[in-house]
Amino acid sequence: MPNTELRQTQEWVDMILDRVKNGRAFNFTIQLKSTSPSQEEDEVLLQNRTTQNRLAKVIGLVGAPMIPEVGYILHPAHWGQGYATEALQAFLRLYWKVIPPGQQEGGYDYAEAHADPENVSSIKVLRKCGFSFIEKREKDVELPLMGVRDTAVFRVARPKRVTQQSTSED
């Protein structure tokens, strides 16, 4: 349910920041690639970095809100264009480099994603990224606008080549 008091929102933000600070979460924006600025615009960018915000448009987020859970959210205007798949695939490459293998402290040999079982498009994105269905949790989550919903849980295993690279560098 939506927060009704500022204190609730502050507690949630503090929890997320604590996860990030302690290496238990990391998230990134999904941005549309900006068009190449002209030389004149380039000089302005060097003088005033805030102008760069005008060139890159944020359309969503991708990350690990609580490791090993990963996910994404995308503005509806950009659904169905491949951005979610591209962002999640790129994020997973980083995830496997950052998260230690399962036999190490804080490590995992899988990433997990949750989706509404009726969100066919999101499930297609997960499958394209190598995730497999694990289980359905009934009446698992309450959403502000949709009420109590089921959750479909998906997992993808750590690729073998990443595990080998990680252990050979230790």
Image (spheres, grey):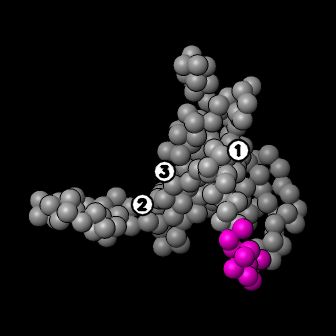
Q: CA distance from mark 2 to mark 1?
A: 24 Å
Residue located 67% across and 28% down the image: 101
SS type, badge 1: loop
Residues packed near mark 3 inside 10 Å, few (<14), some (14 to 19) or many (20 plus): some
Q: Which residue is mark 3?
A: 86
Quarter of the image that includes the N terminus: bottom right
SS type, badge 2: strand
Q: CA distance from mark 3 to mark 1?
A: 19 Å
User: Which residue sits furthest top?
Assistant: 168
Residues packed near mark 2 inside 10 Å, few (<14), some (14 to 19) or many (20 plus): some
Q: Which residue is mark 2?
A: 31
Q: Amino acid at mark 2?
A: Gln
Range of residues picked out in magenta: 1-11
Asked whether the beta carbons under mark 3 and mark 2 sit within 8 Å of each other, the answer is no
Quarter of the image that includes the C terminus: top right
Marked residue nearer the N-terminal end (3 or 1) = 1
Residue 129 lies in quadrant? top right
Q: Amino acid at mark 3?
A: Glu
Residue located 83% across and 50% down the image: 135
Magenta span contains residue 100: no
Residue located 58% across and 24% down the image: 166
Q: Amino acid at mark 1?
A: Pro
Marked residue nearer the N-terminal end (3 or 2) = 2
User: Which residue sits furthest left?
Assistant: 40
Q: Position of residue 43 (x, y in %)?
A: 14, 61
Marked residue nearer the N-terminal end (2 or 1) = 2
Residue located 44% across and 66% down the image: 58
Q: Which residue is mark 1?
A: 68
Q: Is residue 13 above or below residue 157?
A: below
